[in-house]
Image: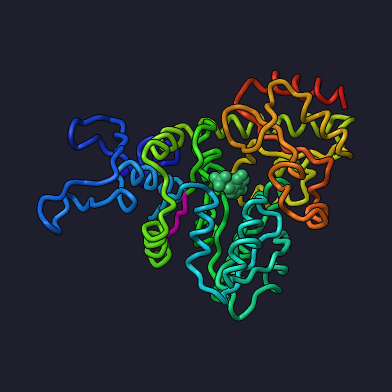
């Protein structure tokens, strides 16, 4: 039995890694090298020539994450945005992409302010209704880019339904699975073709790396991504790959804690008189709770809350002591942020507001501290609101 055939927790610990052939070291070494000495002209040892193209530490991390998503191929990039860019750069000028409108703000900025300039065409839709995706498809649509749950509104896309619609039209489906992680949701099993991650977040889990990865079972997509990794060069360094691999070994343990505390805190905030609304797919009040139960097996530590005004949101976000005010998410420590002024500041105000990213919205990334301490912290901050 190979590591890839085992259950999730075993794959998390073992997939992609063999004891080092030189010493038997159980941990994959950090191959901190830019090149490899060749035996003779045109005769590299074991296929390794130059570290932009091949690095054993990176390969171990790519194989590990691919195994967690149930994929044959993983291709790592220097950041989540570089990973998403590579997926879109498989396409050519004149090709059309349908994208969920409420993606991470940086994804929207890259699509509208960088890739659209190069001749790619984008239509943004509310993918909560699969028919919105169907209506946006054009003869030149090659890709549907989804994020589920979305950042920061925690909207969901029905992956099975949208994959069927996209495939009928000859388009591939890519899913940003950063918020859910493969522990809670495996889009390839639901019909998606490509999964992208900001490994900066839950996969690494310790807020000490920026990274990205794409996984797929599609041989042509994998070949194209390897070609892009080599030809455009946005690769992660070996030390960062090693740290991410160290992180994924405990993904299942951390996600259990994030899921449990996320749920408890969402329920606490929903009952709190100073909170107007809570967006969390694990709450029965979430409009897509049934879909969440169908396609996810845990609801993460991410949630957003509506407080009613910028002033109230500011008091809350600046009033916590354990929840640190900062961008990013998915680390062991809890973070609090204000999407309209932080992660989604580059999305036009009218567009933001239409999606619910109001000035009163605050986003929480619930870490793995004791949930009682976290609840006390949120409660004392809400007293200031
Ligand atoms: C859902 C999601 N996708 C992609 C990204 C971009 O990842 P990175 O910051 O690693 O480039 C982020 C960053 O916050 C994100 O939240």
**Residue nearest the viewer, comparing 113 with 175:** 113
**Residue nearest the viewer, comparing 160 with 139:** 139
**Percent coordinates x, y for residue 8 in the rendering:** 45, 41
Residue at screen point 53% across, 40% down: 200
**Residue nearest the viewer, comparing 352 with 39:** 39
> Which segment is the magenta one?
213-217
Secondary structure mostly seen in the magenta stretch: strand
The image quarter containing residue 232 is bottom left
**Percent coordinates x, y for residue 6 in the rendering:** 38, 42
**Percent coordinates x, y for residue 198 in the rendering:** 54, 46
Q: Quadrant of the C terminus?
A: top right
Outermost residue, left side: 40
Left or right of 349 on screen, residue 30:
left
Outermost residue, bottom side: 139
Residue at screen point 73% across, 38% down: 363
State how the image is colored. Answer: rainbow
Q: Quadrant of the N terminus?
A: top left
**Percent coordinates x, y for residue 154 in the rendering:** 71, 47
Left or right of 9 on screen, residue 319:
right
Left or right of 288 on screen, residue 142:
left
Q: Is residue 209 visible?
A: yes
Relative vertical location of residue 232 with respect to residue 292 in this rendering, above or below: below
In the image, is residue 215 part of the stretch drawn in magenta?
Answer: yes
Residue at screen point 60% across, 61% down: 114
Relative vertical location of residue 220 with respect to residue 146 in this rendering, above or below: below
Relative vertical location of residue 144 with respect to residue 108 in this rendering, above or below: below
């Amino acid at each position: 039995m190979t590591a890839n055939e085992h259950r999730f927790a075993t794959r998390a610990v073992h997939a992609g890694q063999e004891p080092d052939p030189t010493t038997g070291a159980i941990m994959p070494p950090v191959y901190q090298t830019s090149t490899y000495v060749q035996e003779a002209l045109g005769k590299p040892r074991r296929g390794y020539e130059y570290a932009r193209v091949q690095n054993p530490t990176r390969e171990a991390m790519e194989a590990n994450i691919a195994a967690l998503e149930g994929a044959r191929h993983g291709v790592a990039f220097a950041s989540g945005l570089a990973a998403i860019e590579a997926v879109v750069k498989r396409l050519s000028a004149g090709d059309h992409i349908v994208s969920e409108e409420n993606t991470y703000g940086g994804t929207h900025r890259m699509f509208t302010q960088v890739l659209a300039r190069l001749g790619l065409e984008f239509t943004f839709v509310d993918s909560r209704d699969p028919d919105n995706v169907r209506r946006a498809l054009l003869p030149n649509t090659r890709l549907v880019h989804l994020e589920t749950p979305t950042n920061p509104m925690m909207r969901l896309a029905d992956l099975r339904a949208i994959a069927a619609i996209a495939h009928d039209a000859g388009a591939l489906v890519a899913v940003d699975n950063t918020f859910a992680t493969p522990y809670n949701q495996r889009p390839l099993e639901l019909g998606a073709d490509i999964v992208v991650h900001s490994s900066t977040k839950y996969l690494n889990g310790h807020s000490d790396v920026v990274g990205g990865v794409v996984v797929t079972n599609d041989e042509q997509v994998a070949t194209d991504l390897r070609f892009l990794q080599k030809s455009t060069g946005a690769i992660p360094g070996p030390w960062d790959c090693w740290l991410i691999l160290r992180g994924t070994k405990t993904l299942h343990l951390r996600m259990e804690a994030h899921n449990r505390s996320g749920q408890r805190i969402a329920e606490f905030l929903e009952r709190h008189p100073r909170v107007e609304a809570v967006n969390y797919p694990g709450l029965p009040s979430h409009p897509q709770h049934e879909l969440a139960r169908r396609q996810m097996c845990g609801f993460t530590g991410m949630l957003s809350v509506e407080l009613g005004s910028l002033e109230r949101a500011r008091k809350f976000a600046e009033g916590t002591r354990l929840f640190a005010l900062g961008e990013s998410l998915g680390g062991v420590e809890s973070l609090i942020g204000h999407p309209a002024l932080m992660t989604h500041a580059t999305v036009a105000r009218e567009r933001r507001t239409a999606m619910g990213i109001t000035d009163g919205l605050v986003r929480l990334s619930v870490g793995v501290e004791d949930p009682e301490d976290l609840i006390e912290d949120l409660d004392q901050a809400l007293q200031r609101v």
